[in-house]
Image (cartoon, helix red, strand yellow):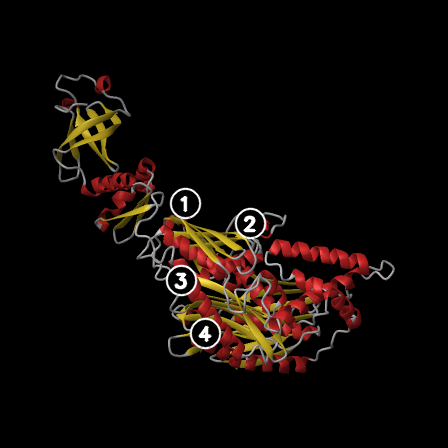
Amino acid sequence: MHTKIFDLGSQSVKIETGLIAKQTDSSVTVDIDGTVILATLVAAKEDSDRDFFPLTVNYNEKTYAAGKIPGGFFKREGRPTEIETLISRLIDRPLRPLFDSSFTREVQLIVTLISYNPEVDPEVAALIASSAAVKLSGLPFNGTLGAVKVGYDGENYLLNPKKSDLDKSLLDLTVAGTETAVMMVESEAKELSEDVMLGAVKYGHEQMQSIIKAIDEFTTEVGVTKLEWNPVKFDDAAYTVLKDKYKDKISDAYKIIKKQERNDALSKIKEEILENELNEDADNESDILSYFSKSQKSIVRERIIAGEKRIDGRDSSTVRSIDVKIGVLPRTHGSALFTRGETQALVVTTLGTNKDAQMIDSLNGRIDEPFIFHYNFPPYSVGEIGFIGSPKRREIGHGKLARRGVQAVMPTLEDFPYTVRVVSEIMESNGSSSMASVCGSSLSMMDAGVPLSAPVAGIAMGLVKEDDKFVVLTDILGDEDHLGDMDFKVAGTESGINALQMDIKVDGITSEIMSQALVQAKDARLHILGEMAKVISKPKDDMSEFAPRYTHIKIDPSKIAAVIGKGGAVIKSIVEQTGAVIDITDEGMVKIAATDQSISDHAKSMIEEITAGPQVNKIYEGKVVKIMDFGAFVSVTPNQDGLVHISQISQERVNNVSDVLSEGDVVKVKVLEVDKQGRVKLTMKDIEN
């Protein structure tokens, strides 16, 4: 067994191997102040001729880590939760580009939370454990990955802040990188400046160096046997011949502005190449396709570096044409159609009551989340046929990013006591549908009357870098994302950044490049906000007629039990009779939600009658609930019955109560008296029934 202990800010980190899961290619535990992660890696034993790298990363949390038993009938962990999916992606994104590009063996990395300190976020421990497991496996991996979390209190950056400190922080940023380069950034902020965000990334990269050093020392102490494998051979000469032969045709195809037409042209070129170059005896189809793919990438990148126009004719800093529509779906509470070039998002906002909040059963306990954001990416958005089912990892990740983009401008529950659900349906996609979702969600919520503190827009930036030359691209297309070196997404308001996500595919991304990307992103963000403001610049004053309305009344806390009734019978009866949703706080604040004001008024009236009690000389309409020899009991209010004595039933003599009344009859009664014991005497005389 080997152990390495080092300090990371105020925390102690322990890396260990050789005790657990010894039949893996590598297994590592990382303990940060009681939060313990187990990372195990297994790789296929044989080389493959596939042209991609099948890396699978699965992060999972065990409830026993927090001393809890899972809920539900089966009492065991089920399908991955949203947080497990997000952390799986967080680990995958910085690791994947560091593997040798010609390595294609299948690799599975399983990362498990086995002990949990609520004050220590497991993300950083999971990234450190994954990095160490990859290094110990001996797989072809370029560099050592480190990761830290950075907070910001308005003056100073915070290294790996505790959960309680992070709740008060203006920034929650996770950054991963190697000794020389930042590979991944994931963050949520509260309208911070570009300088503060860039400073946080730099600070995080500086602080992770101690982690990288510790992992390198640890792997040296353990001793690692490098994997012997046969790289997929790439014939540079054959590639050059094919590229030169078809360069003009490929270049012309990449001057076609419309995505589908461009793809059709490229498909025809591919068919021509296969027809002309395929040698069945040599079995060279995969090689030819590889050369064709690399030729496309090279030709597009050469044009961009040379300062030529981009695929759709734009320069490097121009945003595609924008079209904004709101109120496009008449029966919804709020809706918007945001179109940027060939990317289009239909975004819908629905308002609900606190009963509609999303219940999240986390290791920290049950959370009722009042803001829900869902992102859907159907196959038709890219002109394809595909499977429709539960959301994929990408959809969950994009939805979370878009949610982070608008979280900072959301109203508090005290100011706006609604559950808000936003759904982004991607209608078309050609680059950065997640940022279109940010823009659309801001528009949709303003259309619904959600009092956002400011409109929000998002933009995706790209990069093409060759040696010392680089070009930062504003508002990237799907092809530019695929062929470029960076995916850099920024969402924010006119005042600052709310979310920053960055994924790097190459080493050598300098602070100069990141700074320029942030400057261009700000210019683009302000431009988009200006286009949005032409349609709607602030939340509507009036909500949709179909949205629920809240009515508030204050009652004496001593009357709460009377309103609720035994076993909740009284309040259930009010809800059933009116259709309203009612919530009562311990302080006696009653919130009544209904889609129609008359429903709210009816429920309010019933509650006021209960809390006021029966009033002498007031006439009530009630149901006969019990027949006795001496009279009948009539329900005056939902929790108060009164007695109509046999002598008070009619002006004429009544010998048997049952001759006149039956249980279930609805009659009008007047209150004669409420005695000191709260008993109510009623009469039916002189009242027209």
- SS for tag 4? helix
Q: Amino acid at mark 1?
A: Thr
- The answer for how far apart the CA atoms under marks 3 and 4 are is 23 Å
Mark 3 or mark 1, whichever is nearer to me:
3
- Asked whether residue 586 is in view, the answer is yes
Q: Is residue 602 toward the left or the right of residue 18 in the image?
A: left
Q: Which label number is shown at residue 74?
A: 2
Q: Is residue 302 toward the left or the right of residue 397 in the image?
A: right
**Nearer to the camera, 437 or 271:** 271
- The residue where tag 4 is placed is 197
- The answer for how far apart the CA atoms under marks 4 and 1 are is 37 Å
Q: Earlier in the sequence, mark 4 or mark 2?
A: 2
Mark 3 or mark 4, whichever is nearer to me:
3
Q: Is residue 228 toward the left or the right of residue 389 in the image?
A: right
Q: Which label number is shown at residue 332?
A: 1
Q: Is residue 240 toward the left or the right of residue 96 in the image?
A: right
Q: Amino acid at mark 2?
A: Phe
Mark 1 or mark 2, whichever is nearer to me:
1
Q: Residues within 10 Å of mark 3 (few under 14, many from 20)?
A: some
- The answer for how far apart the CA atoms under marks 4 and 2 are is 45 Å
